[in-house]
Image: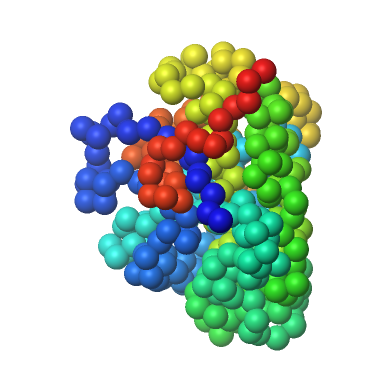
Amino acid sequence: MKIAWALAAALLAFVSTLSPVVAQCGARVRKDWDAMTTAEKNTYKGALAAAMDSGAYIKFVEMHTEMQSEMEAHRQCMFIYWHRLLLVVFENMLRGQGSQYACVTVPYYNWVGANNRVLAGTCSNLGDCSSIMTELGGYTTGTQRTVRINNIGNSGRCNNVFPLNHFCQSGTVSGASCARCVPRSDWGSASVPASTSFASVQQQIFNAKNIGEMSPNVESGCHNNVHASLDATMATFAAPADPIFWSHHAMVDALHTIFHKCRVGTDRLTFAQKAAHPVAWTSCSKRNGGSFSPTEVIVMRTGVNGNNPIQGSQDPIIGRYFTGVPNQFAGLMDVRDLGDSSYTLEAEHGSSYNPAPYTAPVT
């Protein structure tokens, strides 16, 4: 049985001011991995490999592991916003790896669909229930190994199937010194978390009165449990080293889009309205003291092994991919308001707008 996805989005308002790349590619549409053609999948994998070769890919691992950045990324209410910025800039970076990759978007890993297949009895584990598990590098090849990725130990079967055979574990090594593999666990024996079921995900989204409740619900629920089940690299802060990370977070980001559509609505809001919205914006305490402000510039810093960190937007390798992307928390609220990086999401049945069955329950 297939699930009809409600990945809420609308036609972009900036069509008349498209940049040359956007005009060439059309508006960005993120798809379920299973909805992509073989050619699209191959192009996406090629972009990942090119990013690993160029030294740009490891920069995103640096940002996810840098101490001050990580304090904004996890275990507080800005989790959902911080990772949206990371994901958008990563997508921009992939598009910058060559003209053949100028139109790629990050596909989402539909683990709700995987859970549905478990319930239908057609599969029983993460490895068998989603094609992305085998098609984006797989999990059955390689030898047991520990790789220090940006100085964080990651152990598992170090998979070297394309594009993972291009992976380099640090910005200070290259060539033969690169690992050329990413540690993964045996996904064929990994359970599909109960928190990824349709009913559970719906509760995680809509039992929340505002984003300040929804974000922790999703982080500690389906998000954390998928990371834990995948284990190995995906269970550490070096998780962005594994390409599955990006599709996992594209799925999490889709849940944010659904929440915004159903709880906030489709009206376009000014920045001031976003910052004052009681549902779409709520502050919370920072882990290192103080509280988050909607106008605050997000901390997202690069630095090999966390040393001499600088804002990603100033990094000589990836800084240009932040250009034009909102860098304040409230500015990331609506995927229609991200400038040339705005995007919609294609539902499983090919529609970019499908409000059912993820509708907010009547309260």
Q: Quadrant of residue 336?
A: top left
Q: Is residue 108 left or right of residue 290?
A: left
Please name whichever residue, 167 or 221, is drawn nearer the observer in this view of the structure: 221
Asked if 196 appears above or below 135 in the picture, the reply is above
Asked if 55 appears above or below 207 in the picture, the reply is below
Residue 3 position, x and y percent, is 54, 49
Q: Is residue 226 left or right of residue 39?
A: right
Residue 10 position, x and y percent, is 37, 32
Residue 280 position, x and y percent, is 58, 23
| One can see residue 167 in this view | no
Taking the spot 64% from the left edge, 76% from the top edge, the residue there is: 139
Q: Quadrant of residue 13?
A: top left
Coloring scheme of the render? rainbow
Residue 68 position, x and y percent, is 70, 42
Q: Quadrant of the C terminus?
A: top right
Please name whichever residue, 206 or 107, is drawn nearer the observer in this view of the structure: 206
Taking the spot 54% from the left edge, 66% from the top edge, the residue there is: 132
| One can see residue 208 in this view | yes
Q: Quadrant of the N terminus?
A: bottom right
Taking the spot 71% from the left edge, 64% from the top edge, the residue there is: 230
Please name whichever residue, 277 or 237, is drawn nearer the observer in this view of the structure: 277
Taking the spot 78% from the left edge, 34% from the top edge, the residue there is: 287
Q: Quadrant of residue 40?
A: bottom left
How many circles with numbers are drawn on the protein? Answer: 0
